[in-house]
Image (tube, rainbow, N blue to C red):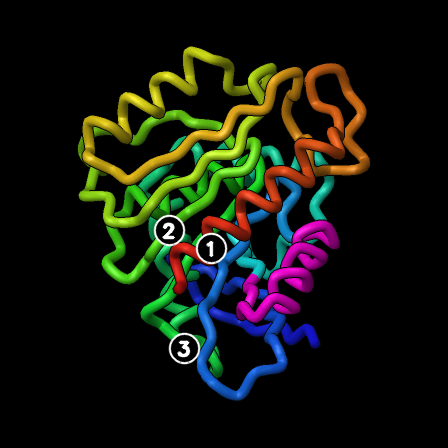
Amino acid sequence: MIAFHDYVAADRLCQAAVVRPDAAEPRPAVLIAPTIRGPTDQEIAVAERLAQLGHVAIVIDLYGRDRRGLAPEAARAEMDALLADRALLRRRLLGALDFARTVPGVDASRLAVIGYCFGGLCALDAARAGAADLRGVVSIHGVFPPLPPALAAEIRAKVLVLHGWDDPLAGPDAVRALADEMTAAGVDWQIHLHGGVGHSFTNPQAAAPGMAYHPDADRRSFEALLAFLAELFR
């Protein structure tokens, strides 16, 4: 069952979609950061799958409740504004984590953030924010621009990156730079690279060159995600 909850993050009224499992005891929470488009049925479907497996799944909102369903140009403007102000993006992410801790049925000691495309960068920035109770993050066909040094914090979370080797938005050099960043920070990290796979490989509607759905990578990456969550929350 999906419930929509308002919360405030960085002085903006946001709205999360929460899907709870059928369980009486407190359960781990998985926050889902969406693509450039903001929350869509695709993220809701992931939340429903995760809830069926025993997690409280929370699709977070990074643009604001009154900015849902934006046209592509408007959505890009919202994303670009956050990319240009990573401190603001961090505050939005920390606000979403604060909200997750208050959701009934959530075990606030067991939190994870996953994200797709722009949401993959958001998952990594949630880790870079250094939240003590964030156990792990997963970037799925994400992008990897590093934080400005002034925003660097100790990364406590484990990191999993699920990525297409042929992704035109984050190629091999960006992957290596991320690995170097995580290694220098002493992070427990994994990068799973899918050969012959580009960006947006989990999106059945994606069909552009370099940005096409890949059913095998979609299946394999979801299996890797579940194994990672099981390790985090056991």
- The residue sitting at 42% across, 11% down in the picture is 173
Residue 124 shown left or right of residue 140 in the figure:
left
Judge whether 16 appears above or below 76 on screen.
below
Q: Quadrant of residue 211?
A: top right
What separation in Å lies between label 2 and label 3 (alpha carbons)? 19 Å
The percent position of residue 154, horizontal first and vertical second, equals 18, 43
Q: How many marks?
A: 3
Picture quarter with the C terminus: bottom left
- Secondary structure of the residue carrying tag 3 is helix
Of badges 3 and 1, nearer the viewer stands 1
Residue 11 shown left or right of residue 79 in the figure:
left
Label 2 Cα neighbours within 10 Å, binned few <14 / some 14-19 / many ≥20? many
Residue where numbered disc 3 is placed: 102
Q: Amino acid at mark 1?
A: Leu
Identify which residue, 136 or 60, lies in the foreground.
Answer: 136
- Secondary structure of the residue carrying tag 2 is strand
Decide which of tag 2 and tag 1 comes sooner along the chain: 2
Q: Amino acid at mark 3?
A: Thr
Label 3 Cα neighbours within 10 Å, binned few <14 / some 14-19 / many ≥20? few
Q: Which residues are magenta?
A: 40-58
Whether residue 56 appears in magenta in the rendering, the answer is yes
Identify which residue, 140 or 54, lies in the foreground.
Answer: 54
Q: Amino acid at mark 2?
A: Gly
Residue where numbered disc 2 is placed: 136
